[in-house]
Amino acid sequence: MTVQRTTLVSLLALLAAGPALADCAIDGSGSVRILSNDFEALRIVDAGAQECASDAVTVTANATTEHKNIQVPALTANPAEYTVAMIANNSIVPLLGDDLIRPLDDLVAQYGQQLQPNQLIKIDGKIMAIAFMANGQHLVMRKDLLDQAGVAAPTSWEEVLTAAQALKDQGILETPLSQPDGGTWDLAAEFVNLYLGTGAEFFEPGTANLAIDNDQGRLALQTMRDMTQFMTPDYATNDTDATAQLYRDGKVAIETNWGSLAATLIDPAQAQPEVAENTVFAAAPTIGGGTIPAAALWWDGFAIAKNISDEDAAASFQAMMHAIRPEVATAKAEAAVWLIQGYQPGPAAVGVVANANGGARPYPMVPWMGTLHEVLGTELADFIKGNEDADKAIADITAAYTAAAQQAGYLQ
Amino acid sequence: MPHSTFLRFMGPSLIAMLLFIALPIVSIVVQSLYVEHPQVLITSETCQPFGGCTTTTTVDASATAQLREDEPLGQFNGLGTYFDRNHLAFREIREILRTADGVGDVVSRIYNLPLYKALAFTVTYCLLVTPLAMILGLMIALAVNTVPQMLKGPVIFFSLVPMLITPLVGALILFWMLNSEGILGAAIQNIFNDPNLSTRTSAPLTWATLIAYGTWTNAPFSFIVFYAGLQAVPRDTLEAAMIDGASRLERIRYVVLPSLKPLILFVLLVQLMDNFRVFEPIISFNAAANATSLSFLIYSSLNTQTTQLFGSAAATSVITIGFIAVLIVPILLRIARELSTGRG
């Protein structure tokens, strides 16, 4: 009995420690504490960093969808609660604004040989973050149903509406479309995607003054409204998880959804067999005769906290380099659209790659974008339900944004 | 009672009330008079994976940090936050009253302002759920009181279930059931024979659902208090009423209700305050598009992805305290009167 238990324990120890010892050798000692959002690809990166745990290095990871709310207070503390903050286009902004992350130039020079130039997020020439994956909302559609209706795969929102009309008229699907118009964040993101696709700017250059009171703003709103007639009656409460589930259940034929969810739509274990088999991904549709996909491009990456010791920073950086080493991109190719060297896009990456190749614009990194996003989420609710027209919606958004931006100190 | 004994007796409670009630209120009142410092902006070159390097505007972190260090509370704004569009919006209301045509237009335009929209639902919810839940609770209590002794335990337990379920979870379960794919949602569509009917998209139906949920979840509290009160209703008065030929309804009207009166006032007070800060069901039902409450506004001022609006949240809190005071002062006066006339 004792012998057996000892054998088991040592086997487990070998399993747990073996690869870590073999793979991840950190130069120096320290503590690595990671804060990240919670989705599959980031969990993979967290797990990769945890392989670096050893006698000299401790590694902990906290993956939570509430990361945006805790990152600023957690990194303001000295020493910071976390040494590594996983961030994206939008969530890096408050960390930069409060001066909570450190320049990485020295660490990149010393430990970052594997990085490619486009992974480096530079502000005024200083490397402030390392990107490792791309994300974005792209078109997802059922080839079989489109063929049945005799329409070609749509490439613009106008064609999507025509295709939806055909699917509905021919009785193939009662609610062929599904867009995330519920959940305040998702609703705002929908408008941001469409407005970016028109090529217009959200703000007057160099200021925090809102500039969406234009034809492009009205076009984006009108398109959002036009889509709702082809959606389930619950559309105003469906977020991206809900629309993805509708799609997996075969209830809709066309939608846009996140690249990070794409794999679940073609996985026969999660989606209905006919859905998994007949789904095609493409770039987000264009809008109003534009040429670029109407979707924001997102990158996910990491930054290192400022208020920590240099040893912890070096250990953290090395652990993250191990977590995003080129083998991860090949071994876990289906989990994300990696920006890591040597990555070969798999079937689930088609949409995001097409967005990037089509010239889709990145989600704006200006400090007041977050304030606008909040306001869009609450003010668009009335519009999307059909209670008010586009002019009224834009007037409401402008008024609410101005009040909030004054509160936040962006406008005087 | 000598003053020193009274102080020793009340002292700890008074200190606790000062620390946990009075000081936080003072703190939010002070906070509500301030807004964030003006952010010092600079232009810098930003490089990211897509689109290469561009010139963007960013916050000058060190200059802004210096401002914060000098005045940690922020920038004094007086009552500005209270009067802006996202709060009491006096300027907007004056404008509406000046330009509107007809009462309907005034109402719909004022309803479009965030605070008044939230207030409309909060007050409606509070004024409907409070009496409905109390009536339902009283009815359950009267019914349970007549159940045979051996069944009382299980019946009481099941009547309390709504109170045992975490509000967020209870509301979420109902939310899923009301999905047009869910059992209740599909049933309602079937009954009204309208495939486009959605309790989640229409505002009146969302309000009705939230109020029904509120009644369901609040009734057990009234029930358990009233049930306890029923045990103390004088038996001989009830029997005398029976001998005088009073029907069951008359006995409830003239004997039971008057003896429950102090309890009714107490439950009314607690429930009004409780219902005025309705919040969880709005989150669970994803109902922000159709119904918001004052608590929800505070939550959304604080739960932001970038700048938390402490001044805005504090101002909404102070306004909420004001409304609760208006709502419960009449009841408190009533209770005080009852006490001074020697009852209760």
Image (cartoon, helix red, strand yellow):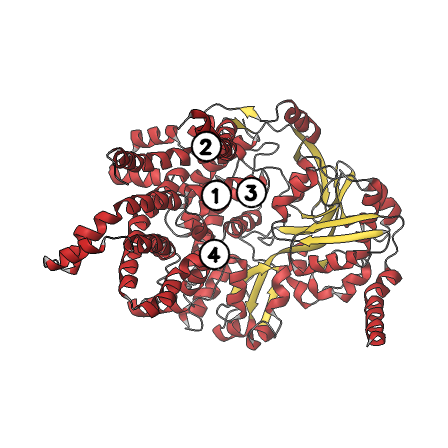
Q: Pick whichever of labels 3 and 4 is earlier in the sequence.
A: 4
Where does label 3 land, which residue? Answer: B304
Where does label 2 land, which residue? Answer: B10
In the picture, the quarter occupied by the C terminus of chain A is top right
Q: Pick whichever of labels 4 and 2 is earlier in the sequence.
A: 2
- Judge by depth and name the residue closer to the eye, A62 or A321: A62
**Does label 4 lie on the same chain as label 3?**
yes
Where does label 4 land, which residue? Answer: B166
**Mark seen at residue A215:** 1
Percent coordinates x, y for residue B154 in the rendering = 38, 67
State how far apart marks 1 and 2 are (Cα): 67 Å
State how far apart marks 3 and 2 are (Cα): 41 Å
Tell me the chain of label 3: B
Query: What secondary structure is found at the residue carrying circle 4?
Result: loop
In the picture, the quarter occupied by the N terminus of chain A is bottom right
Percent coordinates x, y for residue A219 in the rendering = 47, 48
Query: What secondary structure is found at the residue carrying circle 3?
Result: loop
